[in-house]
Image (cartoon, grey):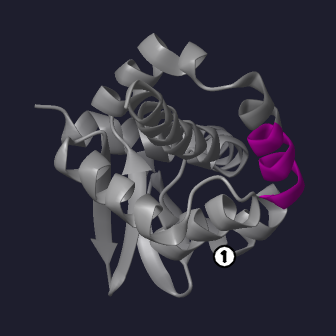
């Protein structure tokens, strides 16, 4: 019984770890693929764990045009930080290696766009993340110089996943 509880905790923490490493919303199908390809958890048990993580607010669902993407919450990050040491080093290494190899494939479904428009004395910077023609996030900022506009675009393209996660976390906080 005790071993079952430890395995359950480790598997849920492993799911949280994957969400943290990916840093942007991921579809239920994508997380399922990661777990099943690495033979960590069976399909039905994983679905149960995802539902429990959702109901505990360790992950949250972001719905955009019939896409149900999942992302770790601040609460989930705190729990993971406290108990990450309960995930076996072997599993962490496997996931890190897998995500390193597959990050391009995972991000291929995402489209990162930046656009700058000149409007009288200002520049309007349009920053966007889309997945399969569905907009996950779009931010329009008004800045006073072309230099600032280019800097924002460069930073968005380089750090979109971290910025997205921080914005979503801020908006989801109580």
- Left or right: residue 150 compared with residue 122: right
Quadrant for the C terminus in the image = top left
Q: Count all numbered tags in the image, as a single digit.
A: 1
User: Residue 119, can we see it?
Assistant: no
Residue at figure coordinates x 43%, y 12% from the top left: 82
Residue that protrudes farthest toward the front in the picture: 1
Q: Residue at x 28, y 58 (%)?
A: 51
Residue 155 is situated, as x and y percent measured from the top left of the image, at 66, 40
**Magenta residues, dominant SS class:** helix
Question: In the image, which residues are magenta?
Answer: 94-102
Q: Position of residue 100 (x, y in %)?
A: 85, 47
In the image, residue 145 above or below residue 1: below
Q: Residue at x 74, y 66 (%)?
A: 37
Q: Is residue 96 magenta?
A: yes
Quarter of image, res 171: top left
Q: Give the crowd class for mark 1: few <14, some 14-19, many >=20 residues within 10 Å.
A: few
Residue at left 36%, top 56%? Answer: 50
Q: Residue furthest left?
A: 174
Residue 25 on image: x %, y %: 48, 58
Quadrant occupied by the N terminus: top left
Query: Secondary structure under badge 1?
Result: loop
Q: Quadrant of residue 89?
A: top right
Position above or below: 30 against 161: below
> Which residue in the structure is indicated by mark 1?
109
Indicate left or right for 51 with 91 as reference: left
- Whether 32 is among the magenta residues is no
- Whether residue 2 is visible to the viewer of this picture, yes or no, is yes
Horizontal side, residue 172 vs residue 106: left or right: left
Q: Nearer the viewer, residue 131 or 124?
A: 131
């Amino acid at each position: 019984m005790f071993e079952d509880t430890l395995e359950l905790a480790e598997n849920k923490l492993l799911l949280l770890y994957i969400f943290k490493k990916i840093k942007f919303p991921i579809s239920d199908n994508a997380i399922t693929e990661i777990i099943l390809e690495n033979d960590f958890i069976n399909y039905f048990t994983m679905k149960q764990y995802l539902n429990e993580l959702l109901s505990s607010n360790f992950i949250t669902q972001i719905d955009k045009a019939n896409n149900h993407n999942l992302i770790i919450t601040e609460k989930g990050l705190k729990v993971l930080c406290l108990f990450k040491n309960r995930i076996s080093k072997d599993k962490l290494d496997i996931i890190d290696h897998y995500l390193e190899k597959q990050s391009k494939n995972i991000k291929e479904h995402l489209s990162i766009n930046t656009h700058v428009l000149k409007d009288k004395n200002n520049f309007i910077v349009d920053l966007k993340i889309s997945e399969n023609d569905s907009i996950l996030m779009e931010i329009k900022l008004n800045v006073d110089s072309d230099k600032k506009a280019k800097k924002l675009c460069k930073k968005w393209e380089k750090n979109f996943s971290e910025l997205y996660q921080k914005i979503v976390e801020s908006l989801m906080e109580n």
